[in-house]
Amino acid sequence: MSGLDHVDNYPEIPVSLAATSTVLKTGAWRSVRPVIRIRTAPCSAYCPAGISIPEYFDHLKEEKLDEAHSVFMERNPFPRITGRVCPHLCEQGCNLAVATDEKPLSIRSIERWLGDQTADLPHPYPTEETGKQVAVVGAGPAGMAAAYYLRRSGHKVTVFDRRESAGGILRYGIPEYRLPTAVVENEIEKLEDMGVEFRMRLALGTDLKLEDLEAAYAAVFVATGATGQRSTGIEGESLLEPGLAFLEAANRNLASLPGERCAVIGGGNTAMDVARMLQRMGAKVTVLYRRTLAEMPAIEEEYERALEDGVDFNWLTQPRKVTKLGDKLLVTVEQMRLGTPDESGRRRPEPTGITRELRFDGVFSATGEKADTAPFPDRLRDSHGWLDLDGDGATKDPLVYAGGDLATGPATVIEAVVAGRNAARAIDAELGYADRWPAEPPADTVSPAEVNVTYMPHHDRAEDPPAVTADPFAEETNTLTAADVLGEIDRCLSCGYCNTCGTCFVFCPDGAILWDNGPRIDHEFCKGCGICVNECPGHAMVLVNEREVSHA
Amino acid sequence: MIELRIHGRGGQGAVVASKTLAQAAFLAGRYVQSYPDYGVERRGAPVVAFARIAEPGDDLFVRQDIREPHHLLILDATLLDSANPIAGLQPGGWVVVNTSDPPSALGIVPRFRVATVNATEIAQRHGLGSAAQPVVNTAILGAFVKATGIVSMEDLLAAIDHEVPVKAEENRLAASEAYEQVLLEVSV
Amino acid sequence: MPERLLLTGNHAAAYGAMLARSEVISAYPITPQTMIVELLSELTASGRLDAKFITVESEHSAMAACVGASAAGARAYTATSGQGLALMHEMLHWAVGARLPIVLTNVSRAMAPGWSIWSDQSDILSQRDVGWMMLFAESVQEAQDFIIWMYRVAEQVFLPGMVGMDAFILSHTAEPLIVHDQEAVDEYLPGFQPLYDLDPEQPRAYGGLVNRDHYFELRYKVYENMERAGQLLIDAGEEFGEVLGHKYTPLEGFMLDDADYVLVSAGAMTSNVRQAVRDLREKGIKAGLLRVIAFRPFPVKQIRQKLGGRKKVAVLDRNMSAGHSGIFAEEIRSALLGRPDAPPVYGYVVGIGGRDVRVETAHEVMNDLLVRDEPEMSLFVGVKGLPIGPLRSDYEIRPLEPLEVMR
């Protein structure tokens, strides 16, 4: 109202001669500006594969199944498999669970639903063939993942495996009630349909020589797993039955019970599988573990299910000696106690000298397997006999890569898948195609202190419902319904990913957030008050100093 | 100027009686006022309403409670015992009471003229209000017209059409029957 | 054609709003105003009144709705009473600052607690300084006509106005009135032309922040227009007589010309004061009546002219500004202050909370006035156990048991 030096020059009411909001560019008042930024959700950060979980959830919410699937497949080609067997580290990081007393999002169950929904969706046949041929040795999860990504990139892929069927640990190591063979076969068929060649009954070191493969293929990826028996240090070890071999026999319907009372030595996921499988075959199973539940490496859910199956646990129990007593096995165990933490951070078991004797019909060892690196020449191994690899699985020989349990020792399926993908990406780059892989998730992870749970719906977590079946070997859980999945996704804060919830639009006091299928900040008028950033449920916005912007 | 006071209980139609009577006089060209002594009214609670009717050609009015009415309408005879409605009534004024008793039975001091009519029975017979809570206002107005002659029956029936929201025909019949049935006692 | 009907004051107000062709009505029911709202909602629902009736959850919102409607160019009307008017207070200021000629009927009742629904001017006079014009009706006819008169002036000065009418004594009293011919009212009151058009194509900010450099000037304009309204009320009242048959003025005198003793009154109780003046004249006392119709703007010049040189002036207030005096008395005194011919002004407080103000009450006041020497600020009439007189100076609080029944 400049120039108003006489009362007669005034309007009758306080009315601006034009809309102040269009004339007064309040953006000039700003010292910081909000920026909508894709950040990493803790679920994605915890996920070994770095799957963009909020992003594909958003697509599911919008009922765009194909888009959700394609986001997922960028980082893990097997949602049906990992959706069933993954230890779901993602859920451990869930900000909702950290910021509230609620349970984390049921991320694995949603992944499983996505996999089942897209089971019949064929993998894309490569649009352009590179003419390069890559050999993959080992048809387990690492080899399958590498095959998928290499083939998708246009390379011709041949997968070799020593067994009669592909799948490796997925088919032969994980019990049917957790991962049905049909699911694994479906994935293999889809790989075949996209042009991956599987050649069975060919073992590396005997039927195949590494140097021959190197000569014949542009690159070789070896992922033959870790199935070798590691010494347990127990006297009379030969009387123990290897757990993994038992699981393979059981998956082939060739296993038989040694008797009613069985023991399983170990506390990992293989120990749980062996114990539960034995229990389901009719045995009464006792797990012997040298530490306590708190230190046990098996995922909690498998332990709980073992309890449900009727498995018994003897904690702080270290078998020392196994002897044959008639048709029974006599196991001498020493009582342990917990001492100081070891390098893994878990408290170390210490002997007490107190022993007792237990009697079983059969005893199974599941204390860890070792990889067989014999087919590799010494120049590719370190002084301990381990393969000498970089982060992508490259050996010293630029054409030879290795990954999965072979490289790491026994680990999870998702880690094997990641190894396969990493090797595929490295091979692809080696073959001259570096630029066609998506960037890694940003290091900037959304912390629990940043999220805003005020506007989120609060309801119970949806979990895979138990299957109603009399068959102990049929799959033990069902997949969620679509309604449950959508309800569960509603709980997702969408950390670091704008899912166009509109909270910023609603709360901006200056109308400086425009809506164009999603929020767009009108920097001419945004005063930089930061309310949008504060209110954004998943903190997919950050405040940036104006000087940083202007100097950038 | 004629000042009237109407005593009833919440639900009997005392306020509408006042307005209807004023309307009848208004139709006859008189200047009128009608108003309730408004309280926090509930069904059954004592209610008072007033009406003023000017002499023909006069329209100068005061606005105050009527303490010394010329006539009374009593819609419920039990009010005679509890509410002292006779207070302030001018000598020679009519007391028109809804009761099945004859005027002589009411024991009202003989300075006043008394008229009685069983307005409850008439209202019930014509379905006015409910059986338990009959609306007796139009019936007692018929009796009042017969007793006082302040307005004509013709104007009363026309006023009922103006002021009574439902059952106009039944209300007119009730007024007419009361007009015929009312018992008059002149004891001044 | 004009019709002569028998209506209550409330229904007359509803007819006034209808005849004025109110386009938006937003009101919240409250005893004793409810019948206004009921009838207007019926009239709008039936289509007899072409208006939008906006139901709201409070009087504050009712006035907010009127503010919005008026700003958008609609003729807006509301009605309320007592606590409802008090709740509206903030929005009353808004209507002034936004210069919106809204008209409001206030059925005046006493303020709670103790809860009271009966006649008392305290509610409307509590809004004395918000900047609304105020008219006090004495009859059912005026309850209707003043709405029309008020719109006529309000829409010339772009200030809102309220019409006060007494609870029950007018609101619930049926008496004959003339319901004007619609065409004649239309001739008197043309359609509302807002000061500024609200145009979504040309957005503007209304009622925004005004800094210290500018607020004073905007308020000055409000005061100027309120002042201007004084003459416009006279002109429009004159014109009302020409077009609609009855002339209205901001002040009304009765037997005033040669009166030595003047009773000043406003609202419905004036009828009884008028009757008392008539009686006094018959007894040979040179009494007169001055009725205040327009309270805002206050007709200062005319009051000086009408009251100058009288022997004594008694002001009857059905209200009280605790700590000072009756509000009409206060205003009359200030209008006369410093005038060489200013008469002594005696303030009388009567009829608080609907206590019957009767013809006899006016007589009591006159009897007291004739013998009293000192013009007291406030003399209380009819407080139980006390003669007419000023507040006691020797009073102390004495706790008593609560009364079982106070009605």
Image: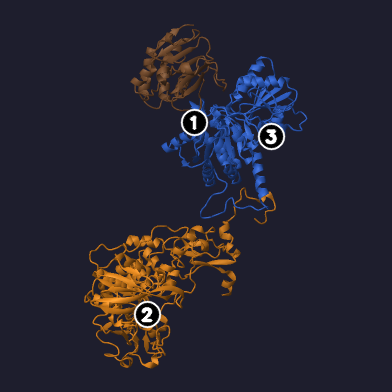
Chain colours: A orange, B brown, C blue
Tag 1, which chain? Answer: C
**Residue C138 image offset from top left, x and y in percent:** 58, 27
**Which of the 4 image quadrants contains residue B158?**
top left
Residue type at mark 3 is Gly
Is the residue under label 2 in contact with that under label 3 (CB below 8 Å)? Answer: no
Left or right: B140 in relation to C287: left
Q: Are marks 1 and 2 on the same chain?
A: no
Instruction: Compare marks 1 and 3 and give the one earlier in the sequence.
Output: 1
Viewer-closest of B128 and C160: B128
Residue type at mark 1 is His
Instruction: Kindly state the secondary structure of the residue where label 3 is placed.
Output: loop
Residue on which the image places disc 3:
C323
Residue C240 visible, this angle: yes
Residue on which the image places disc 2:
A421
Residue on which the image places disc 1:
C11
Question: Badge 3: how crowded within 10 Å, few (<14), some, or many (20+)?
Answer: few
CA gap, disc 3 and disc 2: 88 Å
Residue type at mark 2 is Arg
Tag 3, which chain? Answer: C
Is the residue under label 3 in contact with that under label 1 (CB below 8 Å)? Answer: no
Question: Badge 2: how crowded within 10 Å, few (<14), some, or many (20+)?
Answer: many
Q: How many marks?
A: 3
**Residue A346 image offset from top left, x and y in percent:** 44, 74
Instruction: Kindly state the secondary structure of the residue where label 2 is placed.
Output: helix
